[in-house]
Image: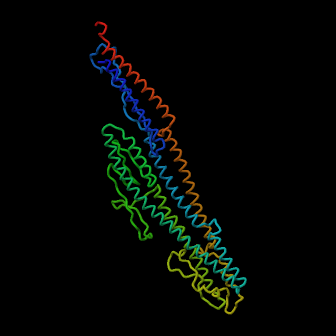
Amino acid sequence: MPNLFSGINTALSAILAQQHAMEVIEHNVANANTPGYHRQEVVLTAGIPYPAAGMSRGILPGQMGTGVTVDRIRRFNIDYFDGRYRRELAESKRWSAQSDILNQVEATLAETSADGLSSKLDAFWNGWQAVSSDPTNQAYRSDLLAKAKSLTDGFNSRAQALMNIRNDQDLAVKQSVEEINNLSTQISRLNIEIVSVKSVGDQPNDLLDKRDVMLDRLAELTGAVSSIQDDGQANVSINGHVLVVGGSTSQLSTVPVAANGNLVNIQWNDGQAFSAQSGELAGFFNARDQIIPSQLAGLNALATGLANSVNAAHQAGYGLNNSHMLNFFEPFTSTNTALELRLSSQMNDPNNIAAATALNAPGDGNQATAIANLRTATVMNGNTVTIGQYLNRQIGDLGLAVNTAASRAKDRDFVIQSLKSISEATSGVSLDEEAANMVKAQRSFQAASQLMNAMDSMLNTVINGLGVAGR
């Protein structure tokens, strides 16, 4: 039955509710710049009215309110939005990773600079042209060997740099596997905590934020897809294979592949091969196993074509000392010819450079001219293109791949930023809005406090004032 004490309870419920509202506002303000944080709000509801509905009723004109209670702490989130965001995030990271690696490859080859292979090849052919004009000139011969040495060094350094970039990507793959395993373990533990909190009727908002950050990172790495169950658990899969189910996980491991230079592949703990179609790992694998090997293969083909054609022509000529059948470049002993390309040890003596077409003809430079003319000879791709054309085609293909990856990364990033803006409009913390809510909660708290004071005064009159007049 309503009485003065019930009025105090009503005022107290208002004070406590506004206190909770203020605490949530404080939490929002404190995390305004925390990545992955979703704005929260106290949802208030009127208390259960008195008396309860029934066949009998008292003298009251109707049900009377009993104050306010905190129904729940709402977390602002668009559930259906998360899946789309993570799909776009995975594609964005895939192209971004690939773009970064291609930029490294492009910088390594340095074909747009004066130190590019094109410039070194031109200098090499010009060196032969100079020797053909004056075969007895030792300065020209020494200069040719210096230019040839610069050319071989250019091939060697580029091949080694590409191999180093490939090994770097292999290391990145290993580190990603460690991160994936760590994230999946943490998500499984959070699943257990979230279920536990929800089972007692509470909202695990901060735990959900923490888990969402991890799910976003898994999507960045692998394109992982997650689904939220009715009990709050998140099940995660990668390309159809389960990674996390409730509190259990499927771990990943790396396995060296001898046929691929002992670079690693990834497999699940059940022995199945791992496959990532999007995310950073897809970019790493594409760069490591396709783009860089393609560039290395082109570089090796170029080194092989150059060495074989020059050696064949050089063996047919004669040096100043009548040397004959000598190689200008060392014969290859492996398929990694760009890394192995070297000047023949017999070229330590400039007189062994075969510039003449006959014995005892020191002034004859016809064979040097023939070698210089290899610049325009179609010796590559089944004798269909020149060495220069083949190199230009390689440069063009790489440039196209660089531009494509950069363009797609930029496009995906634009989509990601648009989706982030939409998400921020709903789940982000607006300090202006929180300031307004804070003032509203503060005023409500003050009003409830004044109500409490009024009820206290009324009780004081009843307890201490009534009956005094009759004494």
> Is residue 260 or residue 139 the one in the foreground?
139
* Residue 241, x across and y down, in percent: 37, 55
* Residue 279, x across and y down, in percent: 47, 55
Quadrant of image for the C terminus: top left
- Give the answer, above or below, for where 85 lies relative to 110: above
> Is residue 151 or residue 290 the one in the foreground?
151
Judge from the rendering whether residue 62 lies leftward or rightward of residue 149; answer left or right: left
* Residue 114, x across and y down, in percent: 65, 68
The answer to which image quadrant residue 202 occupies is top left
Determine the residue positioned at 57% across, 66% down.
108
- The residue positioned farthest toward the top in the image shown: 470
- Give the answer, above or below, for where 288 lies relative to 446: below
Quadrant of image for the N terminus: top left
- Give the answer, above or below, for where 157 lies relative to 24: below
* Residue 23, x across and y down, in percent: 41, 35
- The residue positioned farthest toward the left in the image shown: 56
Determine the residue positioned at 44% across, 53% down.
223
> Is residue 178 or residue 233 the one in the foreground?
178
- Give the answer, above or below, for where 67 lies relative to 35: above
Determine the residue positioned at 36% across, 41% down.
204
The answer to which image quadrant residue 142 occupies is bottom right
